[in-house]
Amino acid sequence: MQLEHQPEIVVLQDPEAVAHFVVSEIIKQVKLKANSVLTIPTGKTPERTYELLVEAVQNGEVNFDKVTLRMLDEYACLERKDSRTFQNHLRRKLIDPINFPNDRFQTIDSWPEDDFPEEARRFENLIKRTPSDLTILGIGQNAHIGFNEPPARPTDRTRVVQLSDDTLRANKKDISKHGKRTPEFAITQGIGNILESKRIILMATGKSKADIIRQAVREAVSAHIPASYLRLHPKTIFFLDRAAASQL
Ligand code: F6R
């Protein structure tokens, strides 16, 4: 049996405050270790965080010259130019505005000409010897972190996964594009990779996340609540707004 920890839970007024706190944690991390490796998510929750982070880098509040940014997950089977890829999303929101160089941006590629299991192996080999210093996560309605859908195992590594119906439904508005196929598969860092990170931050905002946050924090650690595995990590902080914390 693995030791369980009580995650630190920080409840803040609103999503804006959550974004500010997460940015200040990122800045602290990079000031402590200039060559930090940061795993970063996509999705709606961190969007404001990236806007604030771009401002902080542009103002010289923090120096990203030695930082490595690492993707958490990516849809499988979208074209290189498709605006829906997580990689293109991160490029628009963070990478391009701060002129972050490609050689320190560790990406998972979505392009259809690639062999996805091979792409997952390539990424796993790239990251396995250098665990992330800080991993930032959102949480899905079914408690997925990255695209680790339930049931998930704490030993899972980077691999190709099939998206659950819950996730396809939740993401439909963003990923269904007229006349284009909706991706049903993804490549994700596994729970095992996430738990190797030296520190983990999970951010969640809004009432729609309240029940799943309660389950992740209060219910027994289980494969059916992938985010509950974060309690096996001694340095996890949950940054929540009041709405997301309302069932704790
Ligand atoms: C995205 C990711 C997902 C999202 C989750 C929440 O890279 O890994 O686990 O964090 O689906 O998405 P939002 O933030 O859109 O509610």
Image (cartoon, rainbow, N blue to C red):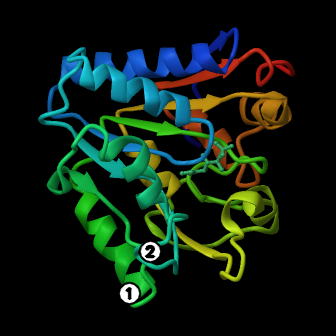
One can see residue 219 in this view: no
Q: CA distance from mark 2 to mark 1?
A: 8 Å
Drawn side of residue 185 relative to residue 193, left or right: right
**Crowding at label 1, few (<14), some or many (≥20) Cα neighbours within 10 Å?**
few
Q: Position of residue 116 (x, y in %)?
A: 44, 82
Q: At 38% across and 87% down in the image, what residue appears? A: 114
Q: Quadrant of residue 33?
A: top left
**Crowding at label 2, few (<14), some or many (≥20) Cα neighbours within 10 Å?**
many
Disc number at residue 110? 2
Look at the image and tell me in which quarter the N terminus lies: top right
Look at the image and tell me in which quarter the C terminus lies: top right
Above or below — where is 184 with respect to 54?
Answer: below
Q: What amino acid does circle 1 point to? A: Asp
Q: Between 30 and 95, which is closer to the camera in this rendering? A: 95
Above or below — where is 239 with respect to 125?
Answer: above
Q: Position of residue 239 (x, y in %)?
A: 60, 21
Disc 2 secondary structure class: loop
Disc 1 secondary structure class: loop
The residue where tag 1 is placed is 114
CB under 8 Å between callouts 2 and 1? yes
Q: What amino acid does circle 2 point to? A: Ser
Q: Between 180 and 207, which is closer to the camera in this rendering? A: 180
